[in-house]
């Protein structure tokens, strides 16, 4: 009896896969509203040590930690980004620019977001953001984790703390990849 039930479940699963049916529900991103993260997230997973060439991470607390060009997803059809990807340049002066190529992030780029950012301790605040539909123009707060290999940045991970912009949360749910230093 047990084997016949198992057999039926297996046949249904195989038929479902063969016919292209999907049993999982679509995941939706919800706005995040909070003021902080659990205290256990106040530390790096693998602290970076001077002179050691291994993967490590740093919690960004200043512009110098993130300055440069990073590649990211930009899936919102409002921007029509090629292949759903864009580039963001964080400048030392607290400004950022998104564009369709790394080169085009050197100055504000038509039809792409731009704005300012600053740090409040270990919290990264984006405010304001220009060139985006509401509610994405208001302030959002993240913790940023810079994954490095030795001294070289490799990826940037956003941990949302407070953000009403669902499309930004979706775009930043995946790590951004390091492209180049900011000039």
Image (cartoon, helix red, strand yellow):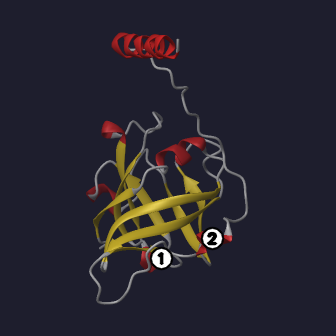
Which image quadrant is residue 129 in? Answer: bottom right
Which residue is rendered at x = 39% and y = 36% of the image? 80
Q: Which residue is mark 1?
A: 63
Residue 103 appears left or right of 39: left
SS at badge 2 = helix
Nearer to the camera, 36 or 87 = 36
Res. 40 mark: 2
Q: Is residue 96 visible?
A: yes
Res. 6 mark: none
Which residue is rendered at x = 73% and y = 63% of the image? 35
Question: From the viewer's perspective, is residue 125 above or below residue 81?
Answer: below
Q: Position of residue 141 (x, y in %)?
A: 63, 61
Give me the C-alpha separation between circle 1 and circle 2.
23 Å
Looking at the rendering, in which quadrant would you find the C terminus? bottom left
Q: Position of residue 2 (x, y in %)?
A: 52, 16
Which image quadrant is residue 68 in? Answer: bottom left
Which image quadrant is residue 70 in? Answer: bottom left
Which residue is rendered at x = 30% and y = 55% of the image? 104
Which residue is rendered at x = 28% and y = 57% of the image? 102
SS at badge 1 = helix
Question: From the viewer's perspective, is residue 20 above or below residue 63?
Answer: above
Q: Is residue 92 visible?
A: no
Q: Position of residue 135 (x, y in %)?
A: 65, 44
């Amino acid at each position: 009896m047990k084997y016949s039930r198992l057999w039926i479940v297996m046949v249904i699963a195989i038929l479902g896969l063969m016919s292209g049916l999907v049993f999982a529900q679509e995941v939706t991103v919800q706005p995040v509203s909070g003021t902080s993260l659990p205290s256990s997230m106040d530390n790096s997973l693998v602290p970076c040590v001077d002179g050691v060439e291994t993967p490590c991470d740093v919690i960004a607390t200043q512009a110098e930690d993130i300055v440069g060009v990073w590649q990211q997803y930009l899936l919102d059809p409002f921007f029509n980004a090629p292949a759903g990807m864009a580039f963001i340049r964080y400048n030392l002066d607290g400004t950022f620019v998104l564009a369709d190529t790394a080169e085009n992030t050197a100055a504000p780029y038509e039809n792409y977001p731009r704005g300012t950012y600053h740090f409040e301790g270990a919290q990264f605040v984006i405010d304001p953001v220009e060139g985006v539909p509401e509610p994405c123009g208001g302030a959002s707060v993240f913790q940023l984790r810079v994954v490095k290999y030795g001294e070289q940045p490799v990826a940037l991970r956003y941990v949302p703390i407070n953000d009403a912009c669902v499309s930004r949360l979706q775009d930043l749910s995946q790590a951004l990849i390091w492209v180049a230093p900011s000039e």
